[in-house]
Structures are given as structure tokens and as C-alpha cells.
Image (cartoon, rainbow, N blue to C red):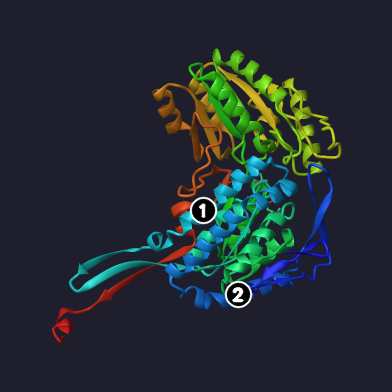
Amino acid sequence: MIQDGQLLNYIGGEWRRSRASEFLDVRNPATAETIVRVPLTPPGEVDEAVQAAQAAWADWRRTPPTERIQYLFKLKRLLDEHFDEIARLAVDECGKTLAESQGELQRGIENIEVATGIPSLLMGYNVEDIARGIDEHMLRQPVGVVAAITPFNFPGMIPLWFLPYAIACGNCFILKPSEKVPMTMSRVFELIDQLGLPPGVVSLVNGAKGVVDALLDHPAVRAISFVGSSPVAKYLYSRATANGKRAQCQGGAKNPVIVLPDADMEMATRIIADSSFGCAGQRCLATSVAITVGEAGPVFREQISSVAATRKVGYGLDAGVEMGPVITTESKQRIEALIGKGVREGAEVLVDGRGASILGYERGYFVRPTVLDKVDPRSELAGVEIFGPVLSLMQAQTIDEAIAVVNAASYGNMACLFTSSGAAARKFRYEAQAGNIGINIGVAAPMAFFPFSGWKESFFGDMHAQGRDAIEFYTQKKVVVERWPREWSRKF
Ligand code: NAD
């Protein structure tokens, strides 16, 4: 909720004006206009949110799962009713196209749908007669107060990787959304406010590092979910676990695709272009390196350059726009500087997206699609996450050589292969060191009922977001061994 141009927090079932003395401007990246101010909430108010959550938990954990999911059914209905409005709001703060915003919100809603299956998903298991008259059961109980810290690039979807499962499992949940895109969740929480949830079951606290650190150090917060860049993911994981908390921290990426000569080249080009330049390359599953094998090289280079050069860039709510701006002016500068660095390292610019100026949006943070060729796998550009619409091309002579480049990377979020050979596909699936694999797929995003499985520097923790991993993360297993001697039964 917005009051006097300032976002409020949602704590203990009510909208509260923060006592913050510092605020940040949230800008529309297509126009650079300030649309709202977000408070950097001080730690005292974080404590109020945790206390409200703790107070609510005593009864929420006793609320039957079948009752808990009724709130989720209602939330899904409300989100469906306000779908377009929320997607448009996300375009304005995040810079995507409307279709991209709608897509991510839909993916978020699918997590609510999966979490409504919690009465089945929560089931434990048991064995009778582990010894005579003794039975053993595994029960799942909620963890308590849990918190999620989310990034700018999916303001509608990523908070919903966590919130539905957390509360369905009987936890109380606190969200700290990205300070760059806090409006989408503020609007979603206005809908959550209509659900009639007990006060404190969910809270929304705006801010940046100060809020995160207060959550990390609060003894009553039992689990931390994080999605963002790898250095921050690593920091949160270390501090949360040092404080005895459970943590799942998803980090950054540098995703490679391999294109074999037997691939359907038209399909591969279209799909890889969507993966590299969709969401202005600001997807943790964006393709940023394409390794062609043998004669796939010249064809792919020509086709991808043509698609990149003709992609329509602009404001995401304007008709026909295929790619929006990047998130901030700093981000634009960083991306352009990295392209320059790549060139100094010996890369050849096939399509140069620097210095973009979009008619009517001259102040926007636009970088056009960029394609760099002959990128050396050992160069800095080849290893760093650019997080913009920049595709680096590399050439290999064999699939083994290409897989070696994939596996030398420090990240392991996603790796894809384009081929019509089943044998090549199986080899790649088997050998590639990444947690999300695509075969003739450019954005191998797991559905809500599968875990979002990053590896290496792309993930710190054990249990991933979504699906059964979410249930594991948001519950603790309790194993009960019971003795009921037979002679006691004879009394009845
Ligand atoms: P970010 O790491 O800058 O910020 C993420 C969150 O952490 C924000 O809420 C921010 O307020 C907080 N934060 C930032 N610096 C902090 C610090 N020093 N201490 C404590 N908290 C801090 O990430 P971003 O720029 O918002 O998002 C882009 C990054 O997220 C990219 O690296 C992208 O690959 C990654 N990402 C990963 C996934 C995934 O599933 N692995 C999904 C989406 C985005």
C-alpha cells in the first residue's frame, strides 16, 4: 500500500508507515521517472514483524492443513481476478514486456496451486512392529518463523516460490522484496490482506541490507530463503547457518548452450534469442554463452546476429515491443563496460547494443541485444555474469570439447543442448554440471512441482525452492517410536 508516495509495511495484519529515516526512489526503468519511495525499515520494526509472526505461529501451526489451504485457494482467485493489473504494475517497476510479466505471474500462481496439495504433500510414513508392539512414525512439523529475501528480476514470481509453501506447511512468513521492485508485492499483499488470515501469519517488510541483517541475526527466525546474486547468496548462507538457521540461497548464473550441427537451426536460433534477450537478459536462466560445434558455427552466427539486430526494444506496455530496458542506469553502465572489456580481451562485436536511445524514452536504461564472437573461454567476460542482453559466441570442434567448456564454469544454474541426436542428448544430460538442463529448450525453468535446482556457485544449501524440496525445507521431521505392549490391549 502506498501513502503519500511512500510504501507501507504490512506487519501483524495491518499496514504500517515505517519510522525509517532513509528512503530510496523506485524508478520506471523505461522512463527514469520516480514512481514511489521505499523505506529502509530499521531493525526495530523487523523485530515487530518477527514478534507478530511468533505470536501467530502458536495457533497457525494447529490450524488443520485443509483449513490453511482455503486461504491459498482464495489468494489464487484474487490473483487471477487482478492478473492484468498486477502484470502491468510489474512492467512499470521492472521493465519487462507485458507478456513477460504475465508469464512470470502465471508461474508464481502455479506455486500456489501446488501448495494447495499440502494435505498430501505433508504426509509422513510409518512402520508397525519395528520390534514386537513397537511402531515408528515420521511426522512433519512446521519450522516456525521463516523469511524470504528476493531479487529484482521476477517481482511477481519469486516471492511466490516461498510464501504459499511456507504458510501451507504451518509456518509464519516474512517477505523482504527487492528495494528496486517493491510495488508488485505491495499490491499482492493488499490482496492477501483481504484473505482474513490471522494477523502475523504473513508480513511484508521493505528495505535493503539492514532488514536482511536483522532477519539473519534474529534468533526467532528459523529459516531463510534467498534469491539474488552469488556473492550475496554466499554471504546470507554463511551468516544464516552460523546463526543456526536453515538456509536455501540461490545465486547468479552464466548459462551456456551448445549447438550441434544436426540441430534444427531455425528453432535453435529463435529459442536461444528468446533466452538471451528475453527479459533484457536479466533472467537467472538466460543464455549468455552459445558454443557451436563444427559447421554449426557460421550458420548460427549469421542467424543469431540477424535476430539480435532486428529485435524491437522499447517500453514494455507499448505494442509490438519484444525487449524492455535493464533495471537501473548503473546496470546499463556496467553491462556496456563489460562489453567494452570483452572487446579489449579480443572478442569481435557482431551486433553492438551500446548507446541505445529509444524514441520517446530517451532517459530509459536501454541496452540493445548484443552479440560478441570469438570469446575466449579463459577471458574474464566468459566467466562473469553480465545480467544483460549480451550473448557470447564460442566455437568447439567436438561435443566433448564443448561440454568441457560448460563444466569449467564456476556457476551451474542451467546448461542446454540443441541437437536432433538422442545419443548426444543423453551424453549431455549425463555429463553437464548444472542443476537445470534443457534439451532443445532455451529457458529450462522447472515447473512448480519440480525443484529449482542450481549447482555450484549458483546455489548454497541443500533443499531447493518449489516442489517437494519446499516441503522438506519448510518442515522438520519428527520421528516417534511408540511401545504399546500387547497385554495392555487385552484389557479392552
Ligand atoms: P542482489 O543480490 O543484488 O539482491 C537480492 C536481494 O538481496 C535484494 O532483496 C537485496 O535487497 C538484498 N541484498 C543485496 N545486497 C545485500 C547485502 N550486501 N546484504 C544483504 N542483503 C543484500 O540481486 P539482484 O540484483 O536483485 O538480482 C539479480 C541476481 O539474482 C542475478 O545474479 C541473478 O542471476 C540472480 N537470480 C538468481 C535466481 C536463481 O534462481 N538462481 C533467480 C533470479 C535471480
**Residue 374 visible:** no
- Taking 367 as reference, is 129 left or right? left
Q: Nearer the viewer, residue 412 or 95?
A: 95
- The residue under the point 31% across, 68% down is 137
Q: CA distance from mark 2 to mark 1?
A: 23 Å
Q: Quadrant of residue 213?
A: bottom right
As helix, strand or loop, the secondary structure at mark 1 comes to: helix
Q: Up-down: is 219 above or below 118?
A: below
Image mark for residue 199: 2
Q: Residues within 10 Å of mark 2 (few under 14, many from 20)?
A: some
Q: Nearer the viewer, residue 35 or 88?
A: 88
Label 1 sits on what residue type? Asn
- Taking 429 as reference, is 348 left or right? right
- The residue under the point 72% across, 52% down is 181
Which residue does the numbered mark 1 point to in the structure image? Answer: 111
Which of marks 1 and 2 precedes in the sequence? 1
Residue 375 coordinates in the image, percent (x, y): 67, 23
Q: Nearer the viewer, residue 380 or 228?
A: 228
- Taking 408 as reference, is 482 left or right? left
